[in-house]
Amino acid sequence: MPYIIGILIGFVVGAAGVWLFVQMAASNALKQARAEAEQHRHNATQEAQNKAKEIELAARQEQLKRKEQFEKETEAARQQLKQQEQRLDKREDTLDRKLDTLSMKEKHLDDLENRLTRQQKSVADKEQQLDRTLSEQREKLLQISGLSADQAKDMLLKRVEEECRQEAGALVQKLTEQAQEEAKDKSRQIILQAIQRYAAEHTSDHTVSTVTIPSDDMKGRVIGREGRNIRSFEKATGVDVIIDDTPGVVVVSCFDPVRREVARLSLEKLVQDGRIHPARIEEIVATTSKEMEDELIKLGKEAAQEANVGSVARPIVPMLGRLAFRTSYGQNVLKHSVEVAYLAQMMADELGLDGTLARRAGLLHDIGKAMDHETEGGHPQIGMEFLRKFNENEAVLNACLAHHGDAPATTPYTPLIMAADAISASRPGARRESLERYVKRLRELEELATAFEGVRQAYAIQAGREVRVIVDAKLVDDKVSAKIARDIANKIEQEMQYPGEIKVTVMREVRSVEYAR
């Protein structure tokens, strides 16, 4: 029993001790928690104060910034207002000056109006006085002349009419002469522009009618036994074959350039092949003729395309190709026709005409030369009748017929074709002159110059473009030399036919020779 009581007392004492310990621990924890809470509160307060200071500082900075921006905007607005005030002041000053000027002008106009009113009144008075004076003079003139007013009026009108007619005639003549001069200048300018714009080659190819033979043995094979090969060849081609002593050359002669070309090509093929007999000759000639027909069509199409004339009737195309083998004074007729087409088109464009139609007429104007060996008549008539079969334009037909002046021109394109044809044929280098005519012309030039008294020698140089005359210094002085040069030039102009111009140079030289012995 006492043991149990002791245990209970011990338990109570232990519980009281535990309770005290718990109370002390709780009090310490509470104090520590209060201290921490106080510390947190103090920190929070401090942080809140710092934040409040930062916010206040940022707000002050923003306020300063906005204040500065507001002051800048205010200053800009103030400057703008100031500039506007200055402009308004200037405008006001300008308006004041204009108002003063208008006031002065108004005053000046009032003065002019008053002066004009006085002048009008004075003029009216003078007109009345003049009318009275004229009436008095008219009455006196009628009394002196013994004519009535109607008779005097008729006489005056007749005199005025005669004077006006004379002045009108003189004016018409002056305007006509001026128009002719301007037309000449304008036409010359158009022709020169056309020549400059069309830059064609000055030399033309010439159809060759000789065939090179490699050896005399081949020449004998061309002739054949008793001449059967050459007779067969001439019969198949319609040409004359000339074989002479000239080594390595056979000449093919024919008035038809196409047949001559067929013969030349056929003979070249036979020489290359080496098999020359009548059957082979006929075969080669037939093949070459077919190739030539294709070549003519090709050349005709190329010419039509180059001249840009559009569609051409099919029978006309090979005729254009035949012109490629026809020459006139060394000038290729097809190239000449293309050149005439371009020149005519350029001049037509300058004159406001149809350049395409002029180009077509220029290309076809010499088409008759492709058939003049087969048909009687001149090539203009032959070409016109040929083109009429294919419903060519009337301007083209008339240009073909009348481009040599054989028929009247009915359209404005014919004179253009005539001019372009003359330009193409007469330009330097377009045509060649035969050697005999060339030598004859140079000889005539020298003989004409040496016929003058005092001339010792004369030499034609630069292909006849210049003649140099040497005179006797003892018989001719410097003044007479100038006169001789002028006389020779005049005589050349009167008696000779030549392209371009000829320069006459007279030289007078005095030589003094002595010998020292």
Image (tube, rainbow, N blue to C red):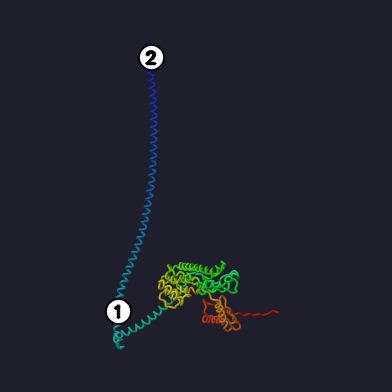
Q: Earlier in the sequence, mark 2 or mark 1?
A: 2
Which quadrant of the figure contains the C terminus?
A: bottom right
Going by the picture, which residue comes out furthest to the top? 1
Residue drawn at x 44%, y 78% as measured from the top left:
406
* Residue 493 visible in the snapshot: yes
For marks 2 and 1, give the one nearer the viewer: 2
**Residue 368: x percent and y percent?**
46, 74
Q: Position of residue 16 (x, y in %)?
A: 37, 18
Is disc 2 surrounded by few (<14), some (14 to 19) or many (20+) residues within 10 Å? few
Closer to us: 426 or 141: 426
| Figure check: 102 above or below 474 | above
Task: Return the x and y of residue 255 as percentages of the image width and height.
Answer: 51, 75
Residue 465 appears in view: no
Marks 2 and 1 close (CB-CB < 8 Å): no
Q: How many marks?
A: 2
User: Which quadrant of the view contains residue 122?
Assistant: bottom left
Q: Is residue 337 above or below residue 143?
A: above
- Identify residue for label 2: 7
Marks 2/1: CA distance? 171 Å
Residue visible at 57% across and 76% down? 461
Tell me the amino acid under the disc marked 1. Answer: Glu
> Mark 1: few, some, or many residues within 10 Å (few <14, many ≥20)?
few
Above or below, 112 relative to 29: below
| 60 left or right of 489 in image | left
Q: Is residue 216 left or right of residue 150?
A: right
Which circle marks residue 371 in the picture?
none
Secondary structure, mark 2, is helix
| Towards the viewer: 233 or 446 | 233
Residue tagged 1: 127
Q: Amino acid at mark 2?
A: Ile
